[in-house]
């Protein structure tokens, strides 16, 4: 299982790095552009990506009530992107260091409305990468709406190390 999860979570970190390189080229007004309440701004989506990965990372640390570091964030867009990449790196390192037994362990957590769940750690890693991929897709869509012509290539095939 680890031989699948390590490249998968490493891909997630790499894809976030590629995306952030493009996002940091945006003008401040582009990063914070409002879409009339229809969809979040680029800034808000990067905050969502950070909070999403952070929440799952805390669950892997067996934190009972996870925090949302983006909720009260007052920094710059550059700082937000930096926090997002740091979080992705933490997740990647956690998986790299995890023992096979740890990856089989079960994580118990509660979502809103007191919904209780138990999930295998390896399923949590899959959830993190899938959820992050969804948010990255939303960010690419916003870049297209901002008429950004050079979009980052984020597919796994472009990441996969050549043998």
Image (cartoon, rainbow, N blue to C red):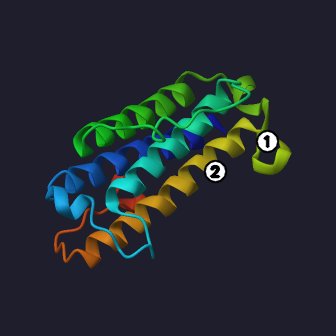
Quick one: quadrant of the N terminus? top right
**Residue 2, located in which quarter of the rendered image?**
top right
Please give left or right for residue 12 compared with residue 97 in the image.
Answer: left
Residue at the image point whose x is 19% and y is 77% from the top: 147
* Percent of width and height locating residue 131: 56, 55
Across and down, in percent, residue 135 comes to: 47, 60
Q: Residues within 10 Å of mark 2 (few under 14, many from 20)?
A: some
Nearer to us in this view, 74 or 81: 74
35 up-or-down from 78: above or below: below
Relative placement, left or right, of 63 versus 34 is: right
Name the side, left or right, on which 148 lies relative to 51.
left
Q: Left or right: 66 with respect to 152?
A: right
Residue 3: tell me if it is visible. no
Question: Which residue is located at x 21 percent, y 50 percent?
Answer: 21
Residue 62, can we see it?
yes
Please tell me the numbered disc located at residue 127.
Answer: 2
Percent coordinates x, y for residue 71 in the rendering: 48, 41
- The label on residue 160 is none
Residue 55 occupies quadrant: top right
Residue 156 percent coordinates (x, y): 42, 58
Nearest the eye: 94 or 50: 50
Q: Secondary structure at mark 2?
A: helix
Say which residue label 1 marks.
119
- Between discs 1 and 2, the one toward the N terminus: 1
């Amino acid at each position: 299982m680890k031989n699948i999860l390590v490249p998968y979570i490493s891909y997630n970190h790499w894809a976030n790095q590629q995306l952030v390189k493009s996002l940091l080229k945006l003008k401040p007004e582009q990063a914070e552009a409002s879409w009339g309440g229809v969809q979040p701004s680029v800034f808000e989506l990067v905050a969502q990506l950070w909070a999403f990965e952070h929440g799952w990372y805390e669950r892997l640390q067996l934190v009972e009530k996870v925090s949302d570091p983006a909720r009260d964030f007052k920094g710059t867009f550059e700082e937000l992107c930096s926090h997002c990449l740091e979080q992705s790196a933490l997740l990647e390192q956690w998986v790299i260091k995890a023992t096979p037994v740890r990856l089989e362990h079960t994580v118990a957590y509660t979502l809103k409305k007191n919904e209780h769940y138990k999930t295998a750690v390896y399923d949590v890693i899959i959830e993190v990468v899938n959820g992050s991929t969804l948010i990255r897709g939303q960010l690419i869509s916003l870049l297209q709406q901002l008429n950004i012509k050079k979009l980052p290539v984020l597919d796994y095939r472009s990441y996969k190390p050549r043998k």
